[in-house]
Amino acid sequence: MITLGNRFFPVRSAVCFFVEGGIILVSVLASFLLLQRWGGVTIIDLHDAIVRGVVVAFFCQSCMYLLDMYDLKHLQKWGDLFFSLVLAVGVVCIGIGLVTYVVPEFGVEGSMYYLTILFVATFLLFWRISFDIYLHQYSPKEKILMLGTGEAAQLLGREIRQWERLGFQLAGFVSIDPETGNNVAGIGPLLGDASVLVDLAKKHRVKKVVVALNERRGGYPIGFLLDLKVHGCDVVEWTTFFEMLAGRIPVDNLAPSYFIFQSGFRKSILLLFTRWLLSLMAALALLFILFPLIAVTALLIKIDSPGPVFYTQERVGRRGKIFRIVKFRSMRVDAESAGAAIWASENDPRITRVGKWIRRARIDEIPQLWNVLKGDIEVVGPRPERPEFVRKLEKMFPYYSLRHTISPGLTGWAQVMFSYCGTIEESKEKLQYDLFYIKNMSVKLDLLILFRTVKIVLLGRGAR
């Protein structure tokens, strides 16, 4: 397991990606060699066959990425796997056909086209089934022993269960409080109490013990934990491990001292300047590239419904500064005629016909590039909220004001990891992702967010 942006990134997903790239390339070369040797057909030379193999691999694996086929944590049913693979191959058939028509020197045509598609579909299906069986039954897993049975331990236990295919396995719970021992039923086995912690770790060949105690009733079993540590067992605090698994900070179960003693949350001047400069350059480039789309969208909005093309709204920026964000108008002019700020909901009746489509494709957000140029926001950061919502949420969540310690963004970690936020409970979930980003902010994490944003925009996910 490696870390990317201070979050676990499963090596098995990377292995799957590169193996499938090789399978696709070999499929193209195999079809070329078969046709040349036994079919009596000489269409292209070996160099051109390799180039075409790379093109096919790019198309196929891009489709598989967009269909979440490399998210091994969630793609667990064979039916879903088969459907996604068929859909990906179908899109590739169309894509390769278009490439062959537009740029023949990079395309695959004739007998080689059909043979390549047959090989790719067959080999990928066989590989995925074999790999799935390996993940379920034979892959090595790092066993985790949980010290604690309270809410924090249960939360982390459920998260670990989702990572079993990717290298972690919950060995069980060790209780330090008899009153909460029965709460872990359905998550993992209760193996005993802290007095047998060392014996349990040896018996189950545990390499990592996670301390997940909501309260220090009776104190930590320091002696047992030290014994485990000096004998090579990794002892970690639960919040750190949870963050690396889930990519969020669990605000409900944090001690007040967490934000004081945890590493992170400190931003160097060089990092802040680099992010600002990259945001400025990206905004200028995107405005130039997207100008035709901006013009067409403005015309469609004007034709579709009466009112202005652009819509401005107050938002809270860095250090609580109020600014006006610019968006394409996607709702009726009287959307908030009652005077109260209202969260958008799914199938909101206030959304216009054109607004429905530009929100789904996130086109309504493009004018915010002007806010980037003005310095109100950056390309990546927590999404700015309306002052009315901020006042309410700051009263409910004590750490909410930390969102305003950095510049807000056009896209963010919460946007690529969580769906649209339209309720108080969803705002709390979103806050956990925002806090994770603020703690671990880096150019590397920003690039990961932008990469995931492309997928969300292309698939129209998370918009309301």
Image (spheres, rainbow, N blue to C red):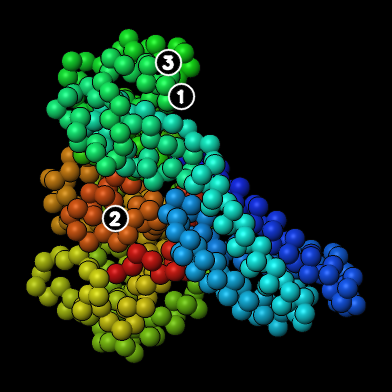
Q: Which residue does the image show at 85% across and 64% down from the upper left?
A: 47
**What distance separates the C-alpha of mark 2 from that of mark 1?**
47 Å
- Quadrant position of residue 111: bottom right
Lower sequence index among marks 2 and 1: 1
**Amino acid under disc 1:** Arg
Judged by depth in the image, the label closer to the viewer, 2 or 1, is 1
Q: Which residue does the image show at 67% across and 80% down from the upper left?
A: 97
Q: Which residue is mark 2?
A: 384
| Relative side of 336 to 402, left or right | left
Res. 272 in view = no
The answer to whether mark 2 and mark 1 are in CB contact below 8 A is no
Q: Which residue does the image show at 32% across and 78% down from the upper left?
A: 356
Q: Residues within 10 Å of mark 2 (few under 14, many from 20)?
A: many
Q: Considering depth in this image, is 391 or 169 the residue closer to the camera?
A: 169
**Amino acid under disc 3:** Lys
Q: Which residue does the image show at 48% across and 54% down from the upper left?
A: 71
Q: Considering depth in this image, is 27 or 270 the residue closer to the camera?
A: 27
* Residue 390 horizontal/vertical position (percent): 19, 52
Q: Is residue 283 above or below residue 174?
A: below
| Relative side of 137 to 92, left or right | left
User: Outermost residue toward the bottom?
Assistant: 303
- Quadrant position of residue 307: bottom left
Q: Residues within 10 Å of mark 3 (few under 14, many from 20)?
A: some
- Quadrant position of residue 373: bottom left
* Residue 64 horizontal/vertical position (percent): 55, 63
Q: Which mark is residue 172?
A: none
Q: Secondary structure at mark 1?
A: loop
Q: Which residue is mark 3?
A: 229
Q: Which mark is residue 205?
A: 1
Q: Secondary structure at mark 3?
A: helix
